[in-house]
């Protein structure tokens, strides 16, 4: 009875009804009984099912049947049984091997049963299968270890004091040893103007209340250099669901951040160049329109000049005709004067005065004829000049039309350039926005 009460006491159970308590234990837990040397005396159905054995296969076998050969030969295992033989109980996790060679993890309580003289009669082990729990813990530990190898990790108290950090964090921030950081405040990584801000105080207040933060952050390295990180600040909760520390997982994205900013700057410069080109195209387009208007006015002026030259040419022809008429009249006058002189000569002395007049008339007719011939010569030269001017004006008109057509074509080309520049500006803006969205997606992923 004393041994039973001792077992119940170690298990934290009341001993007012030992038989009922033991019955409950045997029905809910895996139980195996062994002698002080570790030989198997008994195992209940739960234990046999868990380890995959029949009772006859186990009775008389040593407990080491459930261990790896290396563990069974270890000194720790021999010491383990030596302590049990001296009456020292053991409670803890145990790794065991079932009949199929599979790993089984147990939460076990090895309780020595003593006789009236305090000698160990046997050892009873009560165990629960915690293999699934251990596997989950191992997976979680493995994941955390993988994160620790890949990312910068640092732990803080709820007040922001540094508890520990890994090698990746030290390298990212330029520190050589964890001792340089432990006990100091997170604010050492923050720009001076940010440390005293209300936002920074609220940041730690929210973390201490269990709020998570995730995003890109600018931090200050050991040499005062900017370090850009993608970080996840995660409060860690205790069994009561209350935060007791904060773990930050971070990736150094300084190079990527700077590259992204360079790309954005290049896009902004390219976009500005496109806008400048568009503005210059607008100016050229306006100048082309001015040239077109000037060409149109010049075309009108040339048309007027052509009309004037045509009118001058027509007037020159009329003047030539009039000069011809004058020349004909002078010729007739000269002929009449010649006839009058002949008649005056025949009249003798009576016709002498008339002959003088006839001579004067003849001389005037001759001078009129010469003047008419000179005018005709000048009019002819003028007509030739007018004709040449007419031809040159026509040529200028053709050139002006070509100039106007070229100006219109240049204006159309400028329109096309302006439209293309506007389209390029829009597309560059879209690409720049896409780069920013891509950066945000990378952060969120």
Image: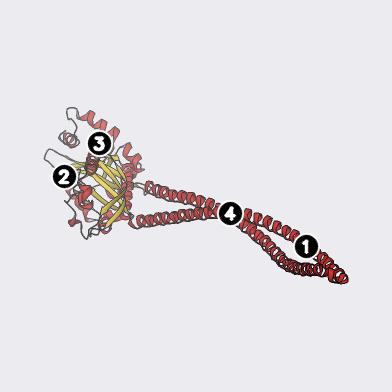
Pointer 2 residue: 88
Pointer 1 residue: 326
Mark 1 to mark 3 CA distance (whole Å): 131 Å
Q: Determine the secondary structure under disc 3.
A: loop
Residue 75 position within the rendered picture, expressed as x and y whole percent measured from the top left:
21, 56
Dividing the picture into quadrants, the one containing residue 46 is top left
Mark 4 to mark 3 CA distance (whole Å): 81 Å
User: How many discs mark residues in the rendered view?
Assistant: 4
Q: Nearer the viewer, residue 344 or 441?
A: 344
First of labels 2, 1 by sequence position: 2
Q: Residue furthest front?
A: 349
Pointer 4 residue: 292
Q: Is residue 323 visible?
A: yes
Mark 1 to mark 4 CA distance (whole Å): 50 Å
Please report contact status of discs 1 and 3: CB closer than 8 Å, yes or no: no
- 4 or 3: mark nearer the eye: 4
As drawn, 369 above or below 275: below
Residue at figure coordinates x 21%, y 47% from the top left:
195
Residue 180 position within the rendered picture, expressed as x and y whole percent measured from the top left:
18, 57
Residue 177 position within the rendered picture, expressed as x and y whole percent measured from the top left:
20, 59
Which mark is drawn over residue 241? 3
Residue 385 position within the rendered picture, expressed as x and y whole percent measured from the top left:
69, 66
Q: Determine the secondary structure under disc 4.
A: helix
- 1 or 3: mark nearer the eye: 1
Mark 2 to mark 1 CA distance (whole Å): 161 Å
- The 10 Å Cα crowd at callout 4, few under 14, some 14 to 19, many 20 or more, is many
As drawn, 381 above or below 110: below
Q: Nearer the viewer, residue 407 or 10?
A: 407
């Amino acid at each position: 009875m004393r041994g039973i009460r001792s077992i119940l006491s170690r298990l934290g159970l009341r001993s007012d009804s030992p038989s009922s308590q033991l019955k409950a234990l045997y029905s809910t837990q895996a139980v195996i009984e062994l002698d002080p040397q570790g030989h198997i005396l008994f195992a209940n159905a739960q234990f046999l099912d868990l380890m995959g054995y029949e009772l006859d296969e186990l009775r008389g076998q040593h407990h080491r049947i459930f261990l790896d050969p290396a563990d069974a030969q270890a000194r720790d295992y021999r010491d383990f049984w030596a302590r049990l033989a001296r009456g020292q109980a053991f409670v803890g996790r145990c790794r065991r091997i079932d009949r199929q060679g599979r790993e089984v993890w147990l939460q076990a309580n090895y309780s020595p049963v003593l006789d009236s003289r305090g000698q160990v009669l046997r050892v009873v082990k009560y165990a629960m299968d915690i293999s699934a729990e251990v596997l989950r813990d191992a997976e979680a530990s493995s994941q955390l270890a993988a994160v620790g190898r890949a990312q910068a990790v640092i732990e803080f108290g709820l007040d922001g004091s540094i508890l520990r950090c890994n090698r990746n964090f030290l390298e990212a921030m330029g520190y050589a040893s964890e001792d340089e950081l432990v006990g100091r405040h997170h604010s050492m990584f923050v720009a001076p103007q940010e440390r005293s801000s209300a936002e920074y105080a609220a940041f730690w207040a929210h973390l201490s209340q269990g709020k998570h933060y995730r995003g890109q952050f600018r931090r200050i390295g050991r040499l005062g250099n900017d370090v850009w990180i993608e970080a996840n600040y995660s409060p860690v909760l205790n069994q009561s669901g209350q935060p007791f520390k904060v773990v930050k997982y971070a990736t150094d994205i300084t190079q990527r951040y700077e590259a992204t900013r360079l790309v954005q700057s290049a896009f902004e410069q390219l976009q500005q160049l496109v806008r400048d080109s568009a503005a210059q195209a607008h100016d050229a387009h306006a100048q082309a329109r001015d040239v077109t208007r000037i060409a149109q006015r010049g075309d009108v002026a040339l048309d007027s000049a052509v009309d004037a030259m045509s009118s001058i040419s027509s007037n020159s022809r009329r003047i030539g005709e009039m000069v011809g008429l004058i020349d004909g009249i002078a010729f007739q006058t000269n002929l009449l004067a010649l006839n009058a002189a002949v008649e005056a000569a025949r009249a003798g002395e009576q016709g002498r005065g008339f002959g003088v007049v006839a001579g004067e008339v003849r001389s005037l007719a001759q001078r009129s004829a010469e003047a008419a011939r000179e005018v005709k010569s000048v009019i002819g030269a003028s007509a030739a000049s007018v004709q040449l001017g007419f031809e040159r004006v026509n040529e200028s008109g053709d050139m002006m039309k070509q100039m106007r057509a070229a100006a219109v074509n240049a204006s159309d080309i400028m329109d096309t350039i302006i439209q293309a520049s506007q389209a390029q500006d829009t597309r560059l803006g879209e690409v720049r926005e896409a780069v920013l969205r891509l950066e945000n997606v990378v952060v969120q992923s």
